[in-house]
Amino acid sequence: MTAAAPAYSRILLKLSGEALMGGGGYGIDDAMLSRIVSEIAEVSRLGVQIGVVIGGGNIFRGMAGAAGGMDRAAADYMGMLATVMNAMALADAMRREGLPARVQSALRIDQVVEPYIRGRAIRHLEAGRVVVFAAGTGNPFFTTDTAAALRGAEIGAQIVLKATKVDGIYTADPKKEPSAQRFSRISFDEAIARNLAVLDATAFALCRDQKLPINVFSIFKSGALRRVVIGEDEGTLVHS
C-alpha cells in the first residue's frame, strides 16, 4: 500500500505550552512530549519540512503576570524565556527520536541556542531538520500566535497548523452546545463575520493578508497532524 503524499511541503506548527502538560497542571509531561514528537517525526518522514513555534504557558504566562501587577513588558520577556525552555525540551526529545532539530530564539542566548536568522532557518529546513522557533517575536505585547504567523510567512510555509485542545472550529462552544457543528472549511471573511477566535487578531490579520491558510486541529487526537498534512478532512481549514 502506497503511503499518501503530503498536501504541503513546508508547514509551520503552532504548539501551546499547555499541550506539553498532558494531564498535569504545570511543566512538561514526558509521555505527552514523547507522543507529540512521534507525530512530528511521522510527518517529517513524509518529506515535509517543519517549523514549530512553541508557547510557554505551562511555565509562565506574561498576561497572567501582568494581571497580577507585574510590569507587562517584564512579564512578557519572562514568558519568552519559558518558551526557550520548552523549545529546548522539544528539540532534545526530537533528537532522542532520531529527528534532527535546531532551536532558534528571537532573544539572543547564543551560549544555549541559535539566534533566529531567517536564511539559516530555511537552510535547516531544506536539510531535513525541524526548526523550533522560541521567544515569540522577541518583542513584548505580541503573542506566540503572532510569532507563528510571522515565522510562517518568513519561511515560506504553505500553511499554519494551530494545535489546540479542540478538533476544529465550531458554530458554538461544543462543550456548552452539544449540537454545535464543526466547520470543515471556512473563509477568513466568514470567520471575521462570525467573530470566531481562530488566532489572536494580529496573527489572524497577518495570515489573511499573506493568504497563508490556517488549520485548527486537536493535538490530543492521535494521528491528527498526519491527517491534516496529507489533506484529509481533519480540523478546520481557514482559507482566503
Image: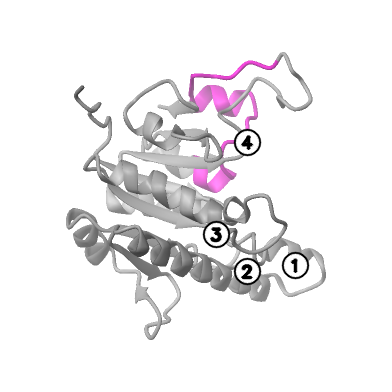
Q: Earlier in the sequence, mark 4 or mark 3?
A: 3
Mark 2 belongs to which amino acid? Asp
Q: CA distance from mark 1 to mark 4?
A: 22 Å
The residues tagged by marks 2 and 3 sit, at their Cα atoms, a distance apart of 26 Å
Apparent side of residue 212 relative to residue 62 in the rendered image (left or right): left
Which is closer to the viewer, label 3 or label 1? 3
Q: Counting other residues with Cα less than 10 Å from the Cα at mark 2, is it few (<14), some (14-19), or many (20 or more)? A: many
In the rendered image, which residue does mark 1 sit on?
66
Q: State the residue position of label 3.
A: 30
SS label for mark 3: helix
Q: Residue furthest right?
A: 68
Is 191 one of the magenta-colored residues? Answer: yes
Element type at mark 2: helix
The stretch of residues the image draws in magenta is 180-204
Q: Quadrant of residue 100?
A: bottom left
The three-letter code of the residue at mark 1 reads Ala
Q: Which mark is residue 76?
A: 2
Q: CA distance from mark 4 to mark 3?
A: 30 Å
Q: Earlier in the sequence, mark 4 or mark 2?
A: 2
Q: Which residue is mark 4?
A: 197
Q: Earlier in the sequence, mark 3 or mark 1?
A: 3
Label 2, label 1: how far apart the Cα atoms are = 8 Å
